[in-house]
Amino acid sequence: MAGRYRSDLKWSDVTPKAGWLNRRELMAGAGALAAGAIAGPAFASLGAKKTSYGSDLEPNSFEDITSYNNFYEFGTGKDDPARNAHRLTIDPWTVKVDGLVDKPGDYSFDDLVSGMTLEERIYRFRCVEAWSMVVPWVGFELADLLNKVGVQPGAKYVAFETLVRPDEMTGQRRNVLNWPYREGLRIDEAMHPLTIMATGLYDEPMPKQNGAPIRLVVPWKYGFKSIKSIVRISLTEDEPPTSWNLANPREYGFYSNVNPNVDHPRWSQASERQIGGGLFAKRIPTLMFNGYEKEVAGLYSGMDLEEFY
Ligand code: MTE
């Protein structure tokens, strides 16, 4: 399978080029490799189909995206995931699919993603902490996966869980959060074409600090909704409990749509700091639904977005 990650591939084999090639050259090179024109360590290239999603956005560097992370299973510092996530075993990887589905089961990573079309999606990514990046994800629509396993009529929500493995995820030895990390979406949000399961970025397998081997990406919501290293997907009738909402319901709602008009109780959400912009870069205004208002506002028509934050 083209998108298969390789456990024997060292990041040092494939990442240095990101430092000296610009994005366009990198993409062109990756395309050539996918076509089999060049042999070499970058054979891990995912060969994702290019789309026009986000072609107007300038992605952050591979270095920015993989060195400034939130992944509390590996520590709470921004550089902890990059330092500690190498301990995570991602092969084999099993995802349990259960609840209101026609084909529940324990799916291997390969079985789960087989038949899915990998696509590049360049998305804005806005953390609730008011920093942002632009990331060239590689993934497929969550809707395709849900259709593959067969969603039953009673299912109204999708719940996700991250792996619990304190031996490797050293941040889990402390109760910073109530593990496992949990997230959830309403079924129409999960089925929206912008919602993807990402298995890579910059046309390469997902770096461990970014949630290897498979994570959710919901670009119009605060970053914490985009749960990493998923091992369970459950279709439920009731709204599932979610980690940050459990930890602090006043500060983190179930919806957590990016909204410049609704401040976090402790800081403004009207603007954001772009990672990689340098120390003196001006903050940029935060956009409603993170710039995806045209596509997703209809999901919330008639809802009071201050009440359902
Ligand atoms: N998923 C898990 N399992 N654990 C986490 O700590 N952090 C969230 C989200 N997904 C997190 C997670 C937060 S707060 C953000 S902003 C994004 O991941 C960060 O994604 P990135 O490191 O790829 O930029």
Image (spheres, rainbow, N blue to C red):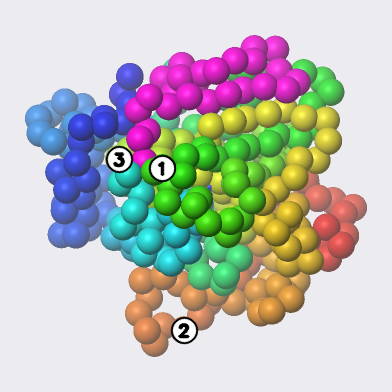
Residue 207 percent coordinates (x, y): 34, 45
* Element marked by disc 1: loop
Residue 216 percent coordinates (x, y): 54, 41
Q: Residue at x 43, y 27 (%)?
A: 93
Crowd around label 1: few <14 · some 14–19 · many ≥20 (10 Å): few
Quarter holding the C terminus is: bottom right
Q: Residue furthest bottom?
A: 280
Residue 138 percent coordinates (x, y): 41, 39
At label 2, the amino acid type is Lys
Query: Any atom of ligand 1 within 8 Å of the CB at mark 3?
Result: no
Rendered view: 183 above or below 95: below
Rendered view: 119 above or below 260: above
How far, Cα to Cα, is label 2 from label 1?
41 Å
Rendered view: 103 above or below 87: above
Task: Please name which of the two marks, 2 or 3, marks the residue nearer to the observer.
Answer: 3
How far, Cα to Cα, is label 2 from label 3?
31 Å
Of the pair 300 and 6, the residue shown nearer to us:
6
N-terminal-most mark, 3 or 1: 1
At label 1, the amino acid type is Asp
Q: How many marks?
A: 3
Q: Residue at x 59, y 30 (%)?
A: 232
Q: Do residues under tags 2 and 3 come within 8 Å of each other at their CB atoms? A: no
How far, Cα to Cα, is label 3 from label 1?
27 Å
N-terminal-most mark, 2 or 3: 3
Which residue is the site of mark 2? 282
User: Where does the magenta region start and end?
Assistant: 88-113
Which residue is the site of mark 1? 167
Q: Is residue 187 visible?
A: yes
Which residue is the site of mark 3? 204
Q: Residue at x 70, y 48 (%)?
A: 242
Residue 246 percent coordinates (x, y): 73, 54
* Element marked by disc 3: strand
